[in-house]
C-alpha cells in the first residue's frame, strides 16, 4: 500500500452512534416544539454540534441568543453521553477489528480523526481506547469539517505528511475536508458517491485490497 498512515473518521466508519445522536437531538427538538426527523438528521452528519443546532433551529420562529444555543447544545450532549453508556465492544464489527489488526501488522500507522468531542469516551466504550497511534478530535480543533484541521492534526501526530495518509470517511463533509487538506480519501456509504473521493469502498475490509 502506498500509504504510511490511515486516518479513520469515527461515527459511521469504525462504529455507529447515529441513533444516539438522533435520539438526543430529537429530545431537544421536542422540548422546544421544533419538527425534527431522520431527513433533517442526515444533514447533521460530519458537522459540529453548534452547526447541527443551527440547522435544527432553522424551523424555529424564536430567535435564540448565543447563550441559549450553548445551553441547548450542552443539554443535548449530556443526553448523548448518557446514551453512549449503552455502547459495548460489540458495536465494532468483527470485519472492522480484523481489518485494523491486519493494517497494523502491515506496519501502517493508524489514527482517528473525528469532530466529536466524545471520541475518547466512545473509543473506551468499544474497547479501542489504546489501539490507535494518534487521536485527533473535537477537543483539539477550532474548525469543524469540511475544514481539514482535524485530519491535519492527526497526520502531524502520526509524524506524516497529508500525501502519505489516507482518510476514511462516510460523510460528504469529511471527503471535502480530506481533499482540502491534501489527503487521498476512501469513501464508504454516502461518501462513496462524492466526486472528489479517491477510492470507493463498500466495507472497511476493502481497504486491504485498494491496490491489488
Image (tube, rainbow, N blue to C red):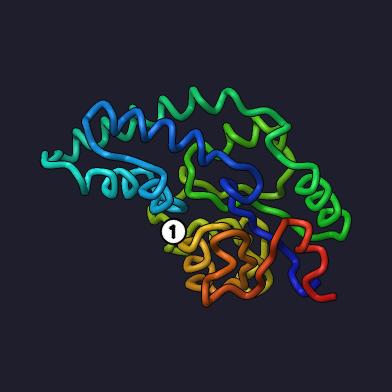
Q: Is residue 192 above or below residue 24?
A: below
Looking at the image, residue 63 sits to the left or right of residue 139; the answer is: left
* Residue that carries the numbered disc 1 in the rendered image: 145
Residue positioned 41% across, 31% down in the render? 24
Q: Is residue 143 above or below residue 69?
A: below
Q: Position of residue 139 (x, y in %)?
A: 46, 43
Quarter holding the N terminus is: bottom right
Q: Position of residue 178 (x, y in %)?
A: 54, 67
Q: Position of residue 28 (x, y in %)?
A: 31, 30
Residue neighbourhood size for the residue with mark 1, other residues' Cα within 10 Å, grouped as few (<14), some (14–19), many (≥20): many
Residue positioned 19% across, 33% down in the render? 68
In terms of depth relative to the viewer, which is nearer, 91 or 184? 91
Quarter holding the C terminus is: bottom right
* Number of numbered discs visible in the structure rendering: 1
In terms of depth relative to the viewer, which is nearer, 203 or 81? 203
Q: Position of residue 121 (x, y in %)?
A: 57, 32
Q: Is residue 21 above or below residue 110?
A: above
Q: Is residue 52 above or below residue 118?
A: below
Residue positioned 39% across, 53% down in the render? 43
In terms of depth relative to the viewer, which is nearer, 1 or 30? 30
Residue 38 figure quarter? top left
Residue positioned 64% across, 55% down in the render? 8
Amino acid at each position: 500500500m502506498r500509504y504510511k498512515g490511515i486516518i479513520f473518521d469515527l461515527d459511521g466508519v469504525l462504529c455507529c452512534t447515529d441513533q444516539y445522536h438522533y435520539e438526543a437531538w430529537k429530545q431537544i427538538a421536542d422540548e422546544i416544539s421544533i419538527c425534527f426527523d431522520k431527513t433533517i438528521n442526515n444533514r447533521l452528519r460530519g458537522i459540529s454540534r453548534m452547526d447541527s443546532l443551527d440547522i435544527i433551529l432553522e424551523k424555529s420562529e424564536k430567535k435564540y441568543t448565543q447563550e441559549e444555543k450553548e445551553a441547548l447544545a450542552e443539554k443535548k450532549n449530556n443526553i448523548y453521553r448518557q446514551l453512549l453508556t449503552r455502547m459495548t465492544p460489540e458495536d465494532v464489527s468483527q470485519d472492522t477489528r480484523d481489518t485494523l489488526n491486519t493494517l497494523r501488522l502491515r506496519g501502517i500507522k493508524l489514527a482517528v480523526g473525528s469532530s466529536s468531542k466524545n471520541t475518547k469516551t466512545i473509543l473506551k466504550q468499544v474497547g479501542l481506547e489504546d489501539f490507535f497511534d494518534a487521536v485527533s478530535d473535537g477537543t483539539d480543533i477550532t474548525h469543524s469539517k469540511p475544514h481539514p484541521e482535524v485530519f491535519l492534526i492527526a497526520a502531524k501526530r502520526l509524524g506524516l505528511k497529508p500525501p502519505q495518509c489516507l482518510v476514511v470517511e462516510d460523510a460528504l463533509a469529511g471527503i471535502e475536508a480530506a481533499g482540502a487538506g491534501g489527503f487521498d480519501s476512501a469513501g464508504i456509504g454516502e461518501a462513496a458517491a462524492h466526486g472528489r473521493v479517491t477510492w470507493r469502498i463498500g466495507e472497511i475490509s476493502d481497504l486491504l485490497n485498494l491496490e491489488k
